[in-house]
């Protein structure tokens, strides 16, 4: 009888040929094979290959191959047995380290790098060497290191991508190679379970615009966050960049630019390219979540609407931002003891994020009130009247729409005349109504910035807002840090410590005037919620990520707000606690998916918590050597 071998991850069967015998083995446990009884396999790691009949054949790795493979490499933590089995003893120094020791050493090395961009590069290369060590190190210093691998530092890494480039990562789909897209896609995914794909076309990277092929950096950073705080197994995720050219002249002029140096493709040929990709995902990974990141404003909304009913699609800048902002706002009105429906909300910057936010908040005004029996419900029409949107041309009014200056998709939120028509309304030279005038007239309770315009919330504006409300709610959300509409320090000073603040990038606490305490600035970044939203959808194999699932996840995050217990505390949990927060989000989303019939799994709500816990990947080493004699 064949000995049972402890073999690998995500594939149903392993076919082994030994001499003339064929062994068909169930796949379970870790991914390497070591058997004293099958000498041709001894000490070998497996790579997956799929033959034409879709039978999986595993090909062994050893020696430098395993050391060079970040998924399996343990470096100095390979055990004595593993070193012998995989022919590593001469390739490693004597000592067998624990993961803790490795983390301590790597942390020391990291600290030797003086700037965050150098630390980012160091961590990038650690990831290319050893996944477990990379994720374990960051998990141990989550609050400190997320800003190094993600916002704001990743923005700098992306804008210098071609100069910092050392090693490729993820899947690059270049426009001129459209014909071989399926081949390239399959070469990267064959034999792997893919739960999550993060894709960007790089047109609107954070607030820094078109970054061409460098946008792969946002796909990989977002995927890393899914693993760190959403427990997504890194080998089940795929970051993708659609390199459809760039309109960033600096990149086009740069002889070291590593992307396709042509103008950005638009219109029909762009749509066909994106569609080819989406259809490949649907064909080969019908259950994976497809996360869109940092597409340009028109494409973001359009593609979400186009594919949302066909596949589990998530646009982070629209939906993730809407969700995290709603959670922060629910926490803030918990402090001001007001109702969501009674807020007067000014949103400055009516692009992808701004529109995602107003959609989500207005929907929540209807949905939250329906579940609150003490109030009358508010209609969708009335909810929209609580918003004032401004873009480059000032307040979005019917007149502005008439001039063709209001983007498609936002018409619902334009302000109607005659309220903004009168002679008493102050306009600028071009006849536009600017933020200060809007704040004076509307007396908003909430001011949100998604404009990429640093300093747009001036002292005069913040002081004006603070005159009319006890606790102005101010959320400058533009990333990275240098693009914030106002710094937390200024918002706090100018409102005399009354502002309830949340920001898109991390900021240090501010001192509350005349009081001996600090106000912790909540980081209102979609990374605090999207990993849980995604995990909830993936775990239930949902066909869609519905608005009701999003609201369920949002409420779960809002319920964890430290400000609920102490109104002077932060509006949202700290990133250090992001993993627990995303667990709660995932559970709420999965329960909602089951309740509303979006789920595609044979188990019920009572099993959700256990399923989510089981699914969450944590960075630790598995024993890669199996001795069949010890196994029954
Ligand atoms: N905190 C978060 O979780 C989060 C999430 C998504 C986006 N963001 C940030 O929000 C910002 C906007 O992102 P986006 O994806 O919506 O980009 P976008 O380009 O779609 O939107 C920006 C909008 O601001 C408008 N704008 C430009 N100058 C303006 C001005 N002077 N006054 C008023 N409006 C002006 C633009 O016309 C555009 O409509 C970025 O900095 C991004 O990093 C933050
Ligand atoms: O990437 C971030 O930090 C958040 C958001 O998706 C953005 O585009 O700014
Ligand atoms: Mn984004």
Image: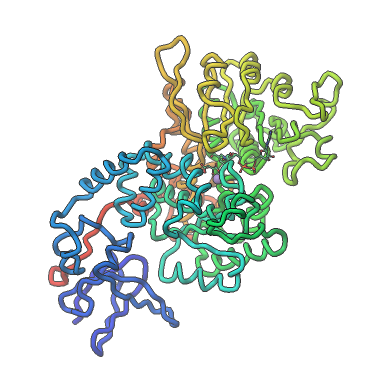
* Picture residue at 56% right of the left edge, 54% below the top: 200
In the image, is residue 492 above or below residue 283? above
**Picture quadrant of ligand 3:** top right
Depth check: give the residue in front, 576 or 263. 263
In the image, is residue 173 above or below residue 346? below
Q: Position of residue 380 (x, y in %)?
A: 70, 38
In the image, is residue 476 above or below residue 157? above
Depth check: give the residue in front, 471 or 184. 184
Depth check: give the residue in front, 481 or 387. 481
Q: Is residue 436 left or right of residue 480?
A: right
Q: Is residue 276 visible?
A: yes
Q: Is residue 431 left or right of residue 322?
A: right
Q: Position of residue 177 (x, y in %)?
A: 58, 70
Question: In this view, which residue lies farthest toward the top?
Answer: 514
Q: Quadrant of residue 562?
A: top left
Q: Quadrant of the C terminus?
A: bottom left
Q: Is residue 29 visible?
A: no
Depth check: give the residue in front, 248 or 404. 248
In the image, is residue 599 above or below residue 41? above
* Picture residue at 46% right of the left edge, 16% below the top: 512
Q: Quadrant of residue 495?
A: top right
Q: Position of residue 223 (x, y in %)?
A: 45, 52
* Picture residue at 14% right of the left edge, 61% below the top: 80
């Amino acid at each position: 009888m064949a000995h049972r071998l402890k073999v690998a991850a995500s594939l149903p069967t392993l076919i082994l040929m030994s001499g003339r015998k064929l062994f068909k083995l169930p796949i379970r446990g870790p991914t390497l094979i070591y058997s004293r009884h099958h000498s041709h396999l001894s000490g070998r790691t497996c790579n997956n290959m799929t033959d034409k009949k879709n039978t999986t054949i595993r090909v062994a790795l050893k020696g430098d191959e395993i050391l060079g493979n970040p998924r399996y490499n343990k470096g100095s933590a390979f055990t004595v047995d593993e070193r012998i089995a995989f022919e590593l003893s001469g390739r490693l120094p004597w000592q067998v380290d624990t993961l803790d020791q490795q983390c301590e050493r790597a942390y020391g090395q990291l600290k030797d790098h003086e700037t965050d961009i150098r630390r980012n590069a160091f961590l990038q290369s650690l990831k290319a060497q050893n996944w477990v060590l990379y994720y374990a190190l960051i998990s141990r210093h989550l609050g400190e290191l997320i800003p190094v691998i993600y916002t704001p530092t990743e923005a700098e890494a992306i804008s210098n991508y071609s100069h910092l480039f050392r090693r490729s990562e993820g899947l690059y789909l270049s426009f001129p190679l459209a014909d071989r897209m399926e081949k390239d896609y399959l070469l990267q995914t064959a034999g792997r379970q893919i739960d999550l794909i993060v894709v960007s076309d790089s047109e609107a990277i954070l607030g820094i615009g078109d970054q061409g092929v460098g946008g792969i950096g946002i796909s990989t950073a977002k995927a890393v966050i899914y693993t760190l705080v959403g427990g997504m197994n890194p080998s089940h995720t795929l970051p993708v960049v659609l390199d459809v050219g760039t309109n960033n002249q600096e990149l086009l002029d740069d002889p070291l630019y590593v992307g396709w140096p042509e103008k950005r493709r638009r219109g029909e040929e762009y749509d066909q390219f994106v569609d080819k990709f989406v259809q490949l995902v649907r064909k080969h990974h019908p259950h994976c979540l497809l996360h869109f990141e940092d597409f340009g404003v028109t494409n973001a909304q359009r593609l979400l609407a186009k594919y949302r009913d066909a596949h589990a699609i998530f646009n982070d800048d629209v939906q993730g931002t809407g969700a995290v902002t709603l959670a922060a706002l629910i926490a803030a009105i918990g402090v001001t003891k007001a109702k969501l429906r009674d807020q007067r909300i000014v949103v400055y910057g009516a692009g992808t994020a701004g529109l995602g936010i107003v959609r989500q908040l207005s929907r929540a005004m209807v949905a939250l009130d329906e579940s609150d029996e003490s109030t009358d419900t508010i209609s969708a029409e009335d909810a929209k009247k609580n918003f004032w949107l401004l873009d480059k041309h000032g307040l979005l009014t019917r007149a502005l729409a008439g001039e063709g200056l209001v983007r498609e998709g936002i018409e619902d939120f334009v302000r109607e005349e005659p309220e903004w028509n009168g002679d008493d309304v102050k306009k600028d030279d071009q006849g536009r109504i600017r933020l200060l005038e809007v704040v004076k007239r509307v007396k908003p309770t909430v001011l949100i910035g998604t404009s990429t315009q640093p300093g747009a919330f001036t002292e005069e504006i913040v002081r004006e807002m603070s005159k009319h409300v006890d606790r102005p709610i101010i959320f400058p959300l533009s990333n990275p840090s240098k693009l914030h509409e106002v710094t937390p320090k200024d918002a706090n000073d100018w409102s005399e410590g009354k502002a309830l603040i949340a920001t898109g990038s991390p900021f240090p606490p501010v001192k509350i005037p005349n009081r001996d305490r600090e106000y912790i600035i909540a980081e209102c970044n979609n990374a605090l919620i999207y990993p849980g939203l995604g995990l909830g959808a993936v775990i239930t194999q949902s066909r869609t990520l519905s608005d009701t699932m999003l609201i369920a996840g949002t409420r779960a995050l809002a319920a964890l707000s430290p400000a609920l217990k102490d109104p002077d505390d932060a509006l949202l949990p700290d990133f250090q606690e992001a993993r627990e927060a995303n667990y709660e989000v995932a559970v709420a989303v999965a329960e909602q998916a089951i309740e509303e019939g979006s789920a595609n799994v044979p188990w019920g709500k009572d099993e959700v918590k256990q399923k989510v816990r089981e699914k969450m990947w944590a960075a630790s080493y598995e024993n890669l050597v199996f001795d069949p004699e010890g196994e029954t």
